[in-house]
């Protein structure tokens, strides 16, 4: 076989392999698009990976699909470790008539929510210290009911107080990919949410952006979650940590 013919065959094989790879990627894109589109809730990356063929890399697929939808009326957005389709921000006004506001949070609840978002993991006593006033259990209950806030664990201090943090639903509600996307000091000042004259040593903390318990937190026990109404009763011995 001449070198010319051999080069043509190698070129053909390479082209055919590249074409197959492209076809596979298009099929995988269709698969993740269908899964996310059909779900009423954001879909976890773990759930997506489990439904794809073994060995398929998820991240480049999601970024490719996100780019494909970037200029459309519906965008693919990342919410924590989950993915969902959402109406483009500039078209939200078209759906205002279809939106039903079920509850308005009180000023106290908004303050507590902001403190939890920026200072998590944080206890009720720490929230009260930051606010300078007592925080009622009802305020925390309202935030737990919205599912924007969750009980994380217990602080390794006397009394073992419960620690609180935000959820992926909080990120989804406020169109955040991760907690690090929360506005910083300059953004808050620019939006008029902070007084023009603030203490020189005033800082906006960078929120903890992990689901894992920190070194000064212990996990909640199953029986504690049942007692708090966060799990249905098991009817048996429930001393396993979650």
Image (spheres, helix red, strand yellow):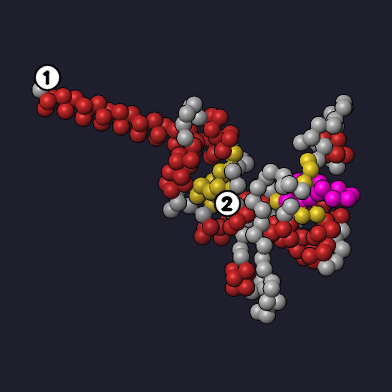
Q: Residue at x 85, y 42 (%)?
A: 228
Badge 2, how many Cα within 10 Å: few under 14, some, many 20+? Answer: some
> In the image, residue 137 lies at what x, y percent?
87, 55
Task: Check disc 1 and report the residue beneath it.
Answer: 1
Is residue 65 visible in the rendered image? The answer is no
Q: Which residue appears farthest toward the top when viewing the image?
A: 1
Magenta segment, principal secondary structure? strand
Instruction: Look at mark 2 in the image and give the residue it sits on.
Output: 177
Name the residue located 51 percent from the left edge and 54 percent from the top edge: 88
Say what secondary structure mark 1 lies in: loop
Q: Residue at x 43, y 43 (%)?
A: 64
Asked which quadrant contains residue 205, the reply is: bottom right
The residue lying toward the viewer, choosing from 55 and 2, is 2
Question: Foreground residue, 158 or 49?
Answer: 158
Which residue sits at x=77%, y=60%? 112
Please indicate whether residue 18 sits to the left or right of residue 129 in the image.
left
* Image location (x, y in percent) of residue 114: 71, 61
Whole-percent x and y of residue 58?
Answer: 49, 37
- As drawn, is 116 to the left or to the right of 7? right
Q: Which residues are magenta?
A: 150-165
Q: Are marks 2 and 1 in contact (CB under 8 Å)?
A: no
Instruction: Tell me, yes or no, if residue 22 can be seen here.
Output: yes
Q: Classify 10 Å Cα crowding around label 1: few (below 14), some (14-19), many (20 and above).
A: few
- Find residue 211 and report its horizontal and vertical position in percent: 67, 45
Mark 2 or mark 1: which is in front?
1
Residue 232 magenta: no
Q: Is residue 11 left or right of residue 98?
A: left
Q: Would you place residue 95 above or below residue 61 in this image?
A: below
**What is the secondary structure assignment of the residue under circle 2?**
loop
Task: State the separation of the CA atoms marked 2 and 1.
Answer: 57 Å
């Amino acid at each position: 076989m001449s070198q010319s013919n051999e080069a043509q065959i190698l070129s053909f094989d390479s082209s055919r392999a590249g074409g197959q790879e492209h076809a596979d990627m298009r099929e995988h894109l269709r698969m993740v698009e269908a899964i996310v589109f059909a779900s009423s809730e954001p879909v976890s990356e773990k759930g997506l990976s489990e439904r794809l063929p073994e060995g398929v890399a998820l991240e480049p697929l999601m970024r490719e699909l996100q780019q494909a939808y970037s200029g459309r009326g519906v965008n693919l957005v990342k919410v924590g470790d989950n993915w969902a389709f959402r109406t483009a921000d500039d078209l939200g006004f078209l759906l205002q008539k279809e939106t039903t506001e079920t509850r308005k949070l009180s000023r106290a609840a908004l303050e507590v929510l902001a403190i939890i978002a920026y200072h998590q993991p944080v206890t009720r006593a720490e929230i009260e210290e930051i606010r300078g006033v007592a925080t009622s259990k009802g305020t925390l209950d309202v935030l737990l009911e919205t599912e924007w806030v969750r009980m994380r664990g217990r602080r390794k201090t006397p009394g073992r107080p419960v620690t609180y943090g935000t959820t992926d639903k909080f990120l989804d509600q406020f169109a955040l990919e991760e907690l690090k996307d929360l506005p910083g000091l300059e953004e808050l000042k620019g939006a008029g949410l902070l007084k023009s004259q603030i203490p020189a040593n005033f800082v906006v903390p960078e929120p903890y952006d992990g689901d894992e318990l920190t070194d000064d937190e212990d996990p909640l026990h199953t029986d504690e979650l049942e007692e708090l109404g966060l799990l249905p009763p098991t009817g048996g011995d429930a001393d396993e940590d979650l």
